[in-house]
């Protein structure tokens, strides 16, 4: 706040007059035709008023600063909590990713094993079908040979 805003125009003129020539107020000798009339009481009153205004402004500024500091501390604590929660969440996700990667690797390994087993089983099945076909042909041949023998023996 400006000093001019806190003082009336009369008080402001008195302060300006004092500042321009303070000797008129303190050490001036009364002239022969003029008697001395001290005006320092009015100046001290103005200065005391200014002092109380400045002190009130200082007190208010200190209160505002304390409130701002408290708000800053609260905000800082809240943001630090958010950062910690974010870091905890990140760690959880990293652990989850590692677990999922491990499960994925295990599943790929199982898939390879299953494909290898399937391939072996299919080869075994093809071999078994071939053996069965040969066995069926041999049985047909034996049956036919036996029928011929039975027919030949019956005649």
Image: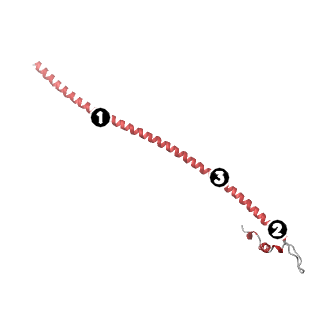
Q: Quadrant of residue 65?
A: bottom right
Instruction: Judge whether 112 appears above or below 43 on screen.
Output: above
Residue under numbered circle 3: 73
Residue at horizontal 11%, vertical 20%? 152
Residue under numbered circle 1: 122
Instruction: Check the picture and name the quadrant holding the N terminus.
Output: bottom right
Which residue is most to the bottom?
A: 33
Q: Residues within 10 Å of mark 3 (few under 14, many from 20)?
A: few
Residue 45's disc is 2
Instruction: Judge whether 84 appears above or below 2 on screen.
Output: above
Q: Secondary structure at mark 2?
A: helix
- The structure's colour scheme is secondary structure
Q: Residues within 10 Å of mark 1 (few under 14, many from 20)?
A: few
Q: Position of residue 155 (x, y in %)?
A: 9, 19
Which residue is most to the left?
A: 155
Q: Position of residue 127 (x, y in %)?
A: 26, 31
Q: Which one is in front in this view, the residue at disc 2 or the one at disc 1? A: 2
């Amino acid at each position: 706040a400006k000093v001019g805003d806190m003082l009336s125009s009369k008080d402001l003129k008195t302060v300006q007059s004092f500042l321009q020539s303070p000797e008129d107020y303190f050490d001036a000798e009364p002239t022969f035709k003029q008697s001395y009339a001290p005006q320092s009481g009015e100046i001290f009153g103005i200065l005391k008023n200014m002092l109380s205004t400045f002190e009130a402004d200082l007190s208010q500024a200190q209160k505002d600063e304390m409130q701002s500091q408290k708000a800053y501390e609260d905000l800082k604590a809240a943001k630090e909590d958010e950062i910690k929660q974010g870091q905890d969440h990140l760690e959880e996700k990293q652990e989850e990713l590692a677990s999922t990667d491990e499960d994925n690797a295990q599943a790929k390994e199982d898939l390879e094993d299953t494909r290898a087993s399937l391939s072996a089983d299919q080869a075994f099945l093809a071999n078994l079908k071939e053996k069965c076909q040969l066995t069926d042909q041999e049985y047909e041949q034996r049956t036919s040979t036996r029928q011929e023998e039975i027919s030949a023996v019956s005649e």
